[in-house]
Structure formats: C-alpha cells, structure tokens
Amino acid sequence: MGRDHDHEPLFVSKEGKVRVAYRVFSATIMVGICLIWLYRIVQFPRDGEEGRSWAWIGMFIAELWFGFYWIITQSVRWNVLYSFPFKDRLSQRYDQDKLPDVDIFVCTADPVIEPPTMVINTILSAMSYNYPPEKLSVYLSDDGGSEFTFYALLEASNFSKYWIPFCKKFNVEQRNPEAYFAHVINDNADLSQELFDIKKKYEDMKNRIKLAVTQGRISKEIRDEHKGFSEWNDEVTKQNHQSIVQIIIDGKDNINAVNKEGCQLPTLVYMAREKRPGWPHNFKAGAINALIRVSSEISNGSIILKLDCDMYSNNADAIREALCFFMDEKRGHEFAFVQHPHWFYNITKNDLYSYYNHVIHKLELAGISGYDAALYSGTGCFHRRESLSGKKYSKDYSGDRDIETKKNDQRSVHELEEASKLLAHCSYEKNTQWGKEMGLVYGCAVEDFLTSLTIQCRGWKSIYYNPERNAFLGVAPITLDIALVQQKRWAEGLFQIFFSKYCPFIYGHGKIRLGAQMGYCVFLLWAPMSLPTLYYVIVPPLCLLHGISLFPKASSLWFIPFAYVFIAKNVYSLFEALSCGSTPKIWWNSQRMLIIKRTTAFFFAFINVIIKQLGLSETTFAITSKIVTEDVSKRYEQEIMEFGSSSVMFTILGTLAMLNLFCLVGATLKMVLPDFGALENLISQVFLCGMMVLINLPVYEAMFFRKDNGCLPFSIMLKSIVLASLACLMMP
C-alpha cells in the first residue's frame, strides 16, 4: 500500500463516439416524424371517402405509435457508456486472501430438454476459473429433481480432478471440455499425450452418462458408491419430491477435496428444492431464491454469479474482471450487479434468426448503462449478495468486501446438508418477503428484468460490461418455431411488467433517471409494437390492390418527410449495425426477423397479456429445447430457415406473405400496367408491398419449392392462401 497504483481506479468508463453528430441527426428525424403526423391531420380524406378515411385514421394511429416508440429508443443512444476494468491492478492491490468468496449458480429444469452432458460442461467451466478454489463454490439447482443430473454431477466432480489442472497447466482458454475438444489444435508436443488422456477420460465419462440416461436407470453399483442416491425412490417425481442438498465436493476438506496434483478443488453442491402439488414454485426465480438461501448456509460468498445451464464460461479471468467494478475504491460500493451480454457459440455466419443482435448488445444495453441502470438479463451476471437479499443502498454504505463466510463453521457436511434442506422447503417462503423485497421478484416470466428494476429503485447502481473476449457463450435456438416461442415468452413477460405496478414510469419515478425508465420501456413495449406493424403490413397492400392511396404523391412536397424518415432511418440502422460488427447480410436478416417477430410472437404475447389482465389465464414458463436432429442442424448450418411444424404463428406468417404477394401482383396487373400514371399515387405502397415480398422470400421458398422436413406443411400453405385470398376479396 502507499504506491501510486494503489490509488488508480480499477475501471474506467468512456462515452460513445459521435454523440453530438447523432443528436443532430436524431433531431432531423424528429422533424420528419412531426411533419408526417401533420400530413395525416391536414390532408384528412374528404367526405364521401369513408373507406379511405378509416384506413387513414389507422395509419395515423400506427404512425403516432411508431414515432412514440422511436422517441423511447433514443434514450439508449443518447448516453452510451463503455466500461473497461484493469484486472492487473486488482491483482497488484489485493492478495488472494483479500478477494471475496464467489458463489456460482447454475440452473437446470429438465434432463430431457437440457441434457446432463450439456449441464456438466457448464459446471466444469465454472469450476475452472483462474480464482482461488477455496473461495469458489459452484451450485447446481436441478428443478427436475433428476437422479441422472445428480449422477452426471458426480461424474463431473471426478473428472474435474483432471480437467482443472490440465486447463491451468496448458493455459486453456476454452474451459468447457466439449467446446475445447471440438476446436483444439494440437501444436504442442508436450500436450499430445496429456490431451489424448484427458479427452479419453471425458469421452468415457460422457458415454457413461448417456448410457445411464438411455437405460433409464442408475445401476446398483453406482448407487452404492454415493449416499446421495438414497434420496431417490419410486415416489420421487419432477413435480413431487422432498428437498435434496448434497455437498459433492467440500471445499474446506484439504485432504479429500483435491485434484490429482494435490491442489484444492472448489466446493460443489447439488440442490433440488422441494416441490409438492398445490404449492407454487415460481419457476426459475423460485429456484434461484432457494439457491440464495442454501448457499448462505454453506459458503455465503459475497458475490454471486448466475448462469443458465446452456451458457458456459468462456473467459477464465471473468471473475477478476467483474471484481474490478465491485472493489473499486471510489465507486465499487455503489454497484449491485455487473451484467455481461448474451453471446452464442452456434450462430450461423449471417445470424439467420438474429440472435447475436450486435446493436442491442454493443450499443443499446451500453446506452442504458449510461444511466447507471444496466439490465439484469438472467444469466452472465455477477451480483452483490446483499443487493439480492433485499438490502437498500445508502450513501454511508462503504461496501462489505469481507462479508462473514462459513469458513469457521465446524459443522459436518451432513449437518450443513440437513440445515440447508430446511431452506429449500416449498413452504419456507410462506409469509416472508421472498419474491417481493428479497431475492428475485415473482409473478413474471422475465423475473430478471423485474428484479433489476426493483434493485435499482432501492438505490443501487449497476453496470454493463462487454469484454473483448466473450465471458459467456450459450446455445441459441436453431429452428424458427423454438426461436419464436422464446421471443413470445420474453415479450409477454416484458409487457406484463409495463402493465403492472412495476411500470418504470410509475415505480421508478423519482428513483431512477428518466433515461433509464425509457430504456427499460424499449424492451417492455416489444409486444404492443406488433399492432402498428401488423397494420402497416396488412392495410397498405389491401388499399394498393383496390387503388386507394394512403401516402402523398411522389411529386408532392409532403412526400419528402416520408422518404427522408424511411431512408435516413434505414441507412443509419445499417451504419449502426456495421459499426457494431455486423455485415449487410446480418443486418438484412435482422430486419426480416424483426418483422417476423412483431407479426407473430409479439402479437401473441400482446394478446396473452391482455387475457391475463382480464384474469382469464395465469403465468406459465416454457423451457426451450436444446436438442436437435442431425438434418435440422445441417439445414441450420446452410442457413435454411426451419419451419416444419403446424404452429399457428406460421399460419399468420404465411398469410401475410401471400397477402402481400397477391396485392403486389394484383395491383400491377390491375392498375400499374394499364395506367402507368397511377404509379405516382401508389408508389409508396408498391414499395412497401415489394419490400414485404422480398423479406418473405424464405417463406415462399418453404411453401412452394422445398421438399425437406423443414418446409412449411401443406396445411399451412393451404390455410395461408385461402385466408389471404379472402382478405383481398372481402375488402370493399
């Protein structure tokens, strides 16, 4: 202490570039939007044009909503802030014994949809951090209560005795074994034999797990090896079982909890909270809250890292980088959590389903962080335990980096397990503040967003950190059906928050900055954006078919604001995407997926929220499958959209595609070819209709040209053609 670097910050934050230029550009767009609104008012159709009047009113409402939402989105571009930690300074300033204990939570819920072999790869990556193992504890919450998941964790604990020293000896970057073995390039002679040995151990372990799952039972020999299997009997089911807590590796045991080189191993704990019929379990939020309590009994780390079972650690120094924010002498005590972006390792070259979302992850989320209000996104997030446990921030809070741990707890492993089981009982939370003021907040499918809002409204700040090397990598859906189901769940949960007492403009008023309130609403309003989008996709094409003009003539001065707003917004959108690392093809795919999501998943999310507000249904939680067949995977790699199901969302998608095709062709034959001069009045609608046809090229291909299992079923094609034809014929 006393050296110059002891007074240097552990992180810095830098403002985004060209902020002034963007604000000027944004102002010109706002002027254009206002002129469009003015046009709709002053050019309202005359008497005798009743059909056109109703379409006109709808266009005005849609454009009002588009403009309002555009204003909301400016909040995440107005104050972009990027943060950079200095992990070397952290190492120089704090010895290992001064670093805080870290608890890592991994959640899984179904051994079929989320295979145990995938889960343990995430666990092994979490156990292999470049961090003192005696300060590291890894917890697996198994909401499926599966003995196969427990068995897989036992296998992983044994394999970790070889895998962790191997990673540290050869400075392995990919600490997920499956990912490492898939991409390793052996150019080190010293590595050859050890690589062969460790890979064989991994394959043997994986085969044993798969064999047990395939056979549907754990052999008696394996059951006799560990007392934990006594928890499972014929009465244990996924939705009806007692609480199970098993400390598989006791990090305090300096004799037995060591790897093959005699070095300490991290603590490893399996937990399946109690589930009983009639008792609410509150989905993943309930599982995490149970983990918070159980971990407080066993290790009580002051920092908690939350990971989904399909999102593994990809940076061995991620903990140290995150601690730079928490342990900074000037501002560290203010932060409740540090959120990393969601990146995926299975994205195609051109991001077919727009899951990488470069602009959201590299710009918009950093823009919200500019208001000290990063969004907790469910995984890849480091939390301060105190903030998750309901503590309010106060100005005199200095940050308890040396929070009391269980190091001096003299209870045996069995005693700790029994005490922890009580905290995982389904009745434990009754008449408590858990799910309200403590832990993750209940009552919403996106408990992460809701929790981050409540934490920030208690005075805490948060920060978004997008490192150069992705800290975490997950699995993205590779079929359109699963992708839309996931998007529907997110949009539904987000809009539910907006409709609740937690609406940022109400709940956050006076507690968080206006820019942060607007930033939340960029995402909370995904669902209602479906309505103006659907209107624009349906009404202008139908009016085009019947010769009804809804936009100014190309020769009119009123045409200028429409053209400017459309061209300027899309050109800037492309520039923004390219500057964030996208390509033109990725940008185009993102535009296609935006239309698809808004007209299908977001629309159904909107309808479901309205139904729930009327008390006609309850919140549900859908787990997206991580299992795909070989032919589906092959088509995904070739960037061929996967339909292959009779989802009602595909009926809407196909109907809209056919509607725009019929209207474009019909209008061309009916008006444009016989009277080319009519094009001037309808040029905007022809253009919009043509753009929709281009966007839907994969849909037409799946309807009429593809013969593989991923094409649109004949029933969907037939219903889409009939519905689109009826819409064209029924409009007066």
Image: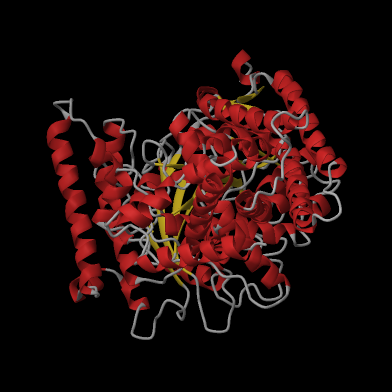
| Image coordinates for residue 424, horizontal then vertical, percent | 54, 70
Q: Nearer the viewer, residue 347 or 651?
A: 651
182 vs 187: above or below: below
Identify the residue at image location x=71%, y=51%: 453
Q: Decide if residue 340 is on the left or right side of residue 369.
A: left
Task: State how many labels appear.
Answer: 0
The quarter of the picture where residue 316 lies is top left
Identify the residue at image location x=73%, y=57%: 498
For the N terminus, the quadrant is: top right
Q: Is residue 107 visible?
A: yes
Q: Nearer the viewer, residue 417 or 702?
A: 702
Q: Nearer the viewer, residue 216 or 254?
A: 216
Identify the residue at image location x=18%, y=49%: 201
| Image coordinates for residue 65, horizontal then vertical, percent | 75, 48
Q: Is residue 119 visible?
A: no
For the C terminus, the quadrant is: bottom right
Q: Nearer the viewer, residue 713 or 125?
A: 713
